[in-house]
Each structure stands twice: as structure tokens, then as C-alpha cells.
Amino acid sequence: MKAVVVQTFGTPDGMAVVDVPAPEPGPGQVAIAVEATGVGGVDAVIRRGTLGGYGFSPGHILGSEVAGTVTGVGAEVDPSWIGERVWAFTGTGGGYVEQAVAAVADLERIPAGLTNEAAVALGNSGSVAHFALRHAHFTPGESVLIRGAAGSIGLLAVQLAAQAGSEAIAVTTSSPERGLRLRELGATHVLDRSGSGDGPATYDVILDVVAGPDLPAFIPRLSPNGRLVLLGVIAGLPPADLSSHLMQSFQRSLSLATFSLDTISRPARALVRRDQFAAAARGELHPVVHDILPLDEAAKAHEQMDAGQVFGRIVLTP
Ligand SMILES: NC(=O)c1ccc[n+]([C@@H]2O[C@H](COP(=O)([O-])OP(=O)(O)OC[C@H]3O[C@@H](n4cnc5c(N)ncnc54)[C@H](OP(=O)(O)O)[C@@H]3O)[C@@H](O)[C@H]2O)c1
């Protein structure tokens, strides 16, 4: 089967389409004929080599979430899964393929009314957005700033914050056009990437998927008792002296936290995902699919991500 691997970490031209044996489902796993694969920001971060210390080696198959039809089951798995249309989390790799394997605990049936493409734009991102707001101890009425809101995590965080009763939802984004689209999803204030614009001076909660050298500039944007939760590293790791910026605001009792979905139990994730899939099928939650490209064009999808052209999520189809 075809798979897209990283041969050289760095630019998208280090990616290649190769032929590999189709994986067999092990105990507790299913095999899935993939019909849609989400191209996540985390894939770009891995491909660039930003997470070099986490043990990714050349030949790594990218991709962490797929949708398709279950074609086989491993030992200890109920064979009635065969033929089901499912979303699946494949881990930190294994998704840019024609046939994937995933643990049965990481599957979700896709309800009628939700496309495969929408499911892979929503699956993990919606859970990250949900649990990140919880990790930030967000309560209704509090103000929220979402840095890097034009990605699939941010777009869902905007919608969830609006639905949970946030009165002020500011977003950072790079263009007025994106700002308009973010307003349609619930943003009340649109800021540029540096955080300048017509919005409150400070926020109770900041969700940040960007990090990088500019992160310290957002610490003074927290209200007293404010909480900044770091979700991603799109712009690279934050500077090493980050904590000194926090200490400069000591008298405002600020909190700086990281959040990874890995710390949320599979059953808890599954409950939230099921609710979000149902909400999206009813039209109450809007995952955003930027474009659908053939699997062979995965490198093109990554070029578009690196060029900052993607609003929401690109989806690959075999
Ligand atoms: N915490 C978790 O459990 C978890 C789970 C999955 C993924 N992640 C992380 O989340 C990140 C990807 O999230 P995503 O897919 O939602 O985002 P994304 O699509 O990669 O990017 C979101 C937006 O960030 C803005 N951006 C890009 N580069 C920037 C820069 N240098 N400075 C400021 N803004 C920039 C862009 O919007 P504009 O051009 O409009 O500014 C972009 O559309 C990755 O770091 C990944 O590791 C975390």
C-alpha cells in the first residue's frame, strides 16, 4: 500500500510516497480502509524536526487521525466492528496511508450527517480545545484569547468558548479575511499575530498553540489570576527565560501551564468526542475543512501549511 513518510526532517521535499506492506491488526486493534486523513499541525511540527528529541526517525509515517471503514479485527476485538464507518486516532504516526491500524479504544463511529472529512477535522482538535478550556479552569463569562486561532484546534476553541458563555473571545490571525471568518464562528475581537488590535487589554484565559519567541509578550496580557495554557509549538519552542517573564508579574498571581491530550483518559476523550460528533452532525459545531487533496499530494499540503495558507484542516484521500 501507499504511505507517506519523512525521509529527511525539515522542508516538505523531505517527504516521499513509498510502498510498504499493509499493517495487520494486532490484539485489541482493527484494520481500516482509509477514506480521509487529517493533516494536522502536529504533523508539520514532526516533519520539520521541531520534536527531534521525541524519537522520530527517517521513514516515519506521518498522520494521527483517519476516517474510513473497518475491514478486519485483531484478537480480542468484536468482529461486529467490520463494515463500520469510523474515526480513529493512530497515535503520532501511521495515518498517511491507504490502510491503517488503530486500537479499538481509539475508534469512534461516525454518525450519519458527519462526513469523513469533517470527522478528521474535528476528532482530536475538538477534544484538545475542550480539555484545554477545562485545564485553564475557564468559567462562563470569562474572557479568552486564542493565539493561532485559524488552525483546527483554535477554530473549535473559539466555538466552544462562545457556546460556554465567554463574553469576550479574541483571536490572533494574520489577515482581515480570516478575522471575518473567525467572527462568524464566535470571535468577538480580532487581533494581529502580535496581539495588537481592538480588544480587551487583558484576558482571564489565553490558549496558545503557537509558542515560539513571541510567547513572553503575551504574559502581560493575562488579567490578575489569569491562566495561559500552552497547547502547541507551531512557531517553535518558547525562549528558555520564559519563567523570568512570569516572575516579573509575580504580584498578579498568573499561571502558565502546558496541556497535552495524552493526560486525558481514553474513556473521557471518547465521551467528549461522541458528543462533539453528534453536535457537528446536528450542525451545532463546525469543523473547517480547508481543502481535500489526494494522498500523493501530502507534501503539497505541508507546503501550504508552511506558507500559512491553510484555514482549518487539509484532508488527504487515498
Ligand atoms: N496539546 C495537545 O494535546 C495537542 C494535540 C494535537 C496537536 N497539538 C499541537 O497543536 C499545534 C497545531 O495546531 P493546529 O493544527 O490547530 O494549528 P495550525 O493549523 O498548525 O496553525 C494554526 C494557525 O497558527 C497561525 N500561525 C502559524 N504560524 C505562526 C507564527 N509563526 N506565529 C503566529 N501565528 C502563527 C496561523 O494562522 P494565521 O496565519 O491566521 O495567524 C495558523 O493557521 C501543533 O503545535 C501541535 O503539536 C497539541
Image (cartoon, rainbow, N blue to C red):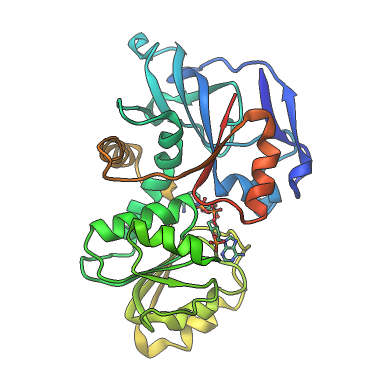
Query: On the rendered structure, is 209 left or right of 157?
Result: right
Residue located at (22% from left, 66% from top): 139
Q: Quadrant of residue 116?
A: top left
Q: Which one is in front, 27 or 318?
A: 318
From where the camera sits, is residue 148 visible? no
Query: On the rendered structure, is 241 left or right of 20?
Result: left
Residue located at (42% from left, 36% from top): 118
Residue located at (41% from left, 87% from top): 250
Could you say where residue 200 lies in the image, as x and y percent from the top left?
36, 81
Query: On the rendered structure, is 266 left or right of 24?
Result: left
Quadrant into which the N terminus falls: top right
Q: Which one is in front, 220 or 243?
A: 220
Query: On the rendered structure, is 194 left or right of 229?
Result: right
Residue located at (33% from left, 64% from top): 136
Could you say where residue 197 lies in the image, as x and y percent from the top left?
46, 79
Classify the position of ligand 1 by quadrant: top left, top right, bottom left or bottom right.
bottom right
